[in-house]
Image (cartoon, rainbow, N blue to C red):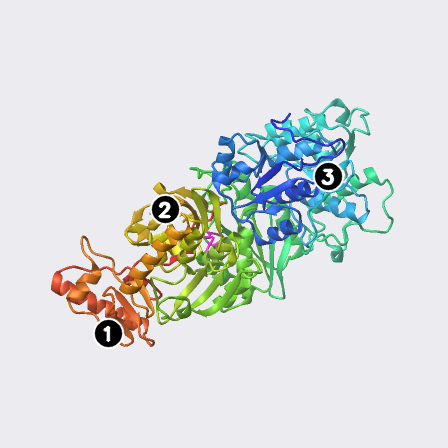
Amino acid sequence: MMRFKIRLSESAMCMEESKRMLFLGVSGAGMAPLAMWCAQAGGQIFGYDDNCKESVSNFLRRSKVNLLPRLLVQSIVQYDTVVYSSALSSEHRLLVEARRLGIPCLRRGELLAAIAESKKLIAVVGSHGKTSTCALIAHAIQKLALGHNFILGGFFQDQRMPFQHSDSEWLLAEIDESDGTINDFNPEITILLNLDWDHCDYYKNLDSLKDTFAALIERTQGCTLIDAETRASLIDRLPVSAKLDVEGDKEKFQLVDCVLEPIPRHQSLGRAAFSNTEFNQSNRAFALALLKQFQKVLPEGVDLFEDFPGVDRRQKSLILDDQLTVIEDYAHHPREIAVLLRAIEALYPESALTLVFQPHRFSRTEALCTDFIQVLDRVENLFILPVYSAFESRKNKGDSSDLWQHFTESSAQALSLDGAGLQTLSAQVRERAALGHQVVLFLGAGSVNEFAHAFCSNYRFTDSSKAWLDYTQKKVSPQCLLKLDEALANKTTFKIGGAARQYAEPAELSDIFALIRSARFFNLDFFCLGRGSNLLVSDSGYAGLVLRLRNKAWQEIEILDDRHLWVSAGVRTKELCGFAAEQGFSGLEFLEGIPGSLGGALRMNAGAMGCWTFDIVERVLMVNASQEIVELARDAFTIEYRKVREIADGIALGAVLKLGSREGRTSVRNRMDSYSDVRKESQPIAPSAGCIFKNPNKDYAGRLIDELGLKNLSVGGAEVSEVHGNFIVNRGHSSASDVRTLIALIQERVKAETGIELEPEILYLGEDEDAFSENSQDASGMEESA
């Protein structure tokens, strides 16, 4: 039995209205349908995912799941139960905190088993085809109006919901064997599709997997549907009644014949014509056998699956034209790949095939390496991507190199999951155009589907910017603003500079991940722009992607308790200190003199009036250089003069800030006003980027410039401010070249007269940006987190 049990109502499962259940990793293919079903059942269901894909967000928004835009460690205490995906790292910050607090934490399978205790469960199990078979049956359940509950482990290719909640006593669900939670189920009916050794991290050999399936059959209360091959492999483990040399209990076991009449090509299962493949025929046979358990006589002359839309990421056609067919599929086991390759050869016997394969998990690649090599050896043109780790640690064995090193260079190549890899693949497909029609097949259960979609955009558009736009606009939320050649001068306090080749204003966290991914696929550096202070943009602009956290989603200020605020990265520092003043909190007054947003202030540890941003930081929520959401305490950062390296290498999303004492609105406002008066008297009002140079050790850049008589020195429209020597102002017609020339003149004069080398404080964005400092980020260097 399970470690935890969810309270059930008399005849149907429902969450207590007073209980709050949190789904971590809610956008997973198995998690989202389960969360939506639970929400429909009446529970208070909340969902959070560090990287919730927009396509899944749409489903969750349409259901009653409360999708959280962010979740801090300190907020986990609000939930009574946590349900987490098996794809979630055991070291995830939120899961670690939930366990520390003693909050019950259930794996997806454990919650599903608790739900199934009050239902008659139809369990779809096996090594291959669970999601497709479940979806076929669910499609027919709706078509026949049977009214059964179902919870899929994936999504239809159309927009129908992947679950159905009803008062029926029956529940159809895909049961995953990968993490051992299959042992918690006691089905009424079991559909055992097939059996191959897999999930090699959990099952050390085929025998242990056989034992698991045999035990499930023993626990099955009613009928088990099984085919001859699987029955033969389990013969020594099954009850006597399952053996064909004994009369047997016909009600307990049903042998399913998986050979059906070929389906006409126009009646294909899904959007590619793969209906007659081995697995699809088997899935269809099992689905029909199950349906006959409920409706002995199915409608004559009606193909229940004729209008089946297919399952997402299964034999999905992305491009179909006279020159090229592009197909993506979830196959990641040698047997699945073999079946699919045979289908491709039958459907496209005259076409040149290119296979792009992403191995899934180091443990599977190591254990089944010989089988993978044998299957892939039949492919003439093979590309192998890096292993999708799914949070497994890298091992000495099980890497992609263990596969491609067995092939000749002409037949197999290693391919990187980035822009370089995309260009290599695209170039070869173009070169092979002379061979006639081509099929490009993308296989894997990880992120290879995103790579496939980027390839398709690259194929459709020769202009890289348009290809980027075509790919990205399908991956971000409707509220995310995307533009090409967007002017940047009006987005900086200097009012200088050219345009960004690609520009985006993300509206939610998933947009940021989609944009970083797009930058990696299209060889773009990217830069996160705040309010544009402390920045000089090149006259030629920026040949990369500029992200700007301007959407209202990044403007949140929330009082967490009487000592702390949550502040999103897009909040203006002036607005932040004004908010604190209105609440009567002290400690943030110095921010009044800092132009820009909190994100920018965190990146450079901005300061004024003898105070620094990190003086008030408790924790920062950010995307790190490995493309992971992390919540780091102040002490975890490397704070340099005008630079916080970890934030410069990632993207700050917001911070928990420490509040001072509550002094009252008037007292705090008076202090802010005094700081404002000092600033107005000592800083110019003309457009500028703020201080140009870092202060040298035990001195001030402004004092050096002033003493050398460099105030009012100008180049073109750029001029050293008469008010403050460490400011360069734009007199209305300055170029970035003017500013850079003036900076060089000042540096030269100060070095010649004092021996001191002034170092620029402002960031330079555009060509030759290394002349100032490291500013933009290389997306190809950001590893993709599983």
- Closer to viewer: mark 2 or mark 3: 2
Q: Position of residue 735 (x, y in %)?
A: 32, 73
Q: Which residue is mark 3?
A: 172
| Front position among marks 1 and 2 | 2
Q: Secondary structure at mark 2?
A: loop
Real-space Cα distance between discs 2 and 3? 53 Å
Q: Quadrant of residue 249?
A: top right
Q: Regarding mark 1 in the picture, which secondary structure is present there?
A: strand
Q: Is residue 404 left or right of residue 675?
A: right
Residue at position x 36%, y 60% from top? 595
Mark 3 to mark 1: distance in Å? 76 Å
Q: Quadrant of residue 564?
A: top left
| Snapshot quadrant of residue 750 | bottom left
Residue ID for mark 1: 714
- Tell me residue 212's x, y (percent): 64, 28
Q: Is residue 536 magenta?
A: no
Please tell me which of labels 1 and 2 falls first in the chain: 2
Q: Residue at x 68, y 28 (%)?
A: 216
Q: CA distance from mark 1 to mark 2?
A: 38 Å
- Going by the numbered disc 3, the residue's amino acid type is Leu
Residue 616 seen in the figure: yes
x, y (%) of residue 135? 71, 46
Residue under circle 2?
616
Number of marks drawn: 3
Three-letter amino acid code at the position of disc 1: Ser
Mark carried by residue 602 = none
